[in-house]
Amino acid sequence: MEKWPLGVFASIDAGLGVKLEVAHELGVPTIQLHAPQKATRTPDHAKEFLARLSDLGMRITAVFGGFEGESYADIPTVTRTVGLVPPGTRSERTQEMKEIADFAALLGVDTVALHLGFVPHDPSDPLYREVLSVTRDVCDHCKKQQQALNLETGQEPADTLLGFMSDVERDNLFINFDPANMILYGSGEPIEALEKVGKYVRSVHCKDAKWAENPGREWGTEVALGEGDVDMERYLRTLDKLGYHGPLTIEREIPQEPERQKAEIGRALMLLEGLKKKIG
Ligand code: MG
């Protein structure tokens, strides 16, 4: 397989990704797909969708779960609303995550991913055990259909994440590394973090951000690729050193500005093409 095929985060009818037509116009061979709404997650839709992708010459490398009621408005809101951590919505979302994995299986996709939510940093916190248990439950469901579960990074410092990955004790649990999230959430220098968790990294986002004045208390700022504090060349060189040669999936979370989103992703693709040539 080609080293580092380029990709974008895309969606059909739900989520922050670019539309399929836009992904096609951008000329990328791969997408990560934000899971469509429940009504769309049927065998017939899967078949139709696969035919359309094949016409467009694209393949899906991962399906991302997302849930009604999640908000990324600020860090406390993320803690309260995102992923499988919040107790009030946990059981219904766990069920839905399994259904999303089933839909991914219908699409022939062997990787599902999600923002798990804020894993407590203290393993003696009772919530930590609950999150371990729900993660095992989803991993075991995925395992039955030969799928991996990739956790999006950002909310946890690398050491917390490493401890958590090992405590789950499942061999199909991996990481979708997002360097910008480390900056946005203020959870650590991204390249250092990548080196620490590298052995688990099976998919990545190419996204950039600038540090907040008070990291961890307020959001950093997401910016166009190459304009932030990640250092894309160092990022790719580190991925190369770690032996990661999978898709480079661009994520630019400004769906409210589709024209700008498309233009910036177009420039991001050129930047990554250039770095791919340079690094080889
Ligand atoms: Mg991401």
Image (tube, rainbow, N blue to C red):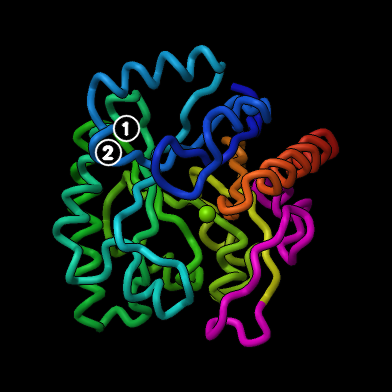
Q: Position of residue 136 (x, y in %)?
A: 21, 55
Q: Residue 84's mark?
A: none
- Three-letter code for the amino acid on which mark 2 is drawn: Ala
Q: Which residue is mark 2?
A: 101
Residue pictured at 19% horizontal, 45% vertical: 140
Which quadrant would residue 179 be assigned to in this image?
Answer: bottom right
Which quadrant would residue 228 be assigned to in this image?
Answer: bottom right
Mark 1 surroundings within 10 Å by alpha-carbon count, few (fewer than 14), some (14 through 19), many (20 or more)? many
Q: Which residue is mark 1?
A: 104
SS assignment at label 1 = helix
Residue pictured at 55% horizontal, 17% vertical: 56
Q: Are marks 1 and 2 in contact (CB under 8 Å)?
A: yes
Residue pictured at 64% horizontal, 24% vertical: 2
User: Residue 4 vs residue 273: left or right?
Assistant: left
Mark 2 surroundings within 10 Å by alpha-carbon count, few (fewer than 14), some (14 through 19), many (20 or more)? many
Magenta span includes 214: yes
SS assignment at label 2 = helix
Which residues are drawn in magenta? 212-241
Which quadrant would residue 224 be assigned to in this image?
Answer: bottom right
Determine the CA span between mark 1 and mark 2. Answer: 5 Å
Q: Is residue 252 above or below residue 45?
A: below
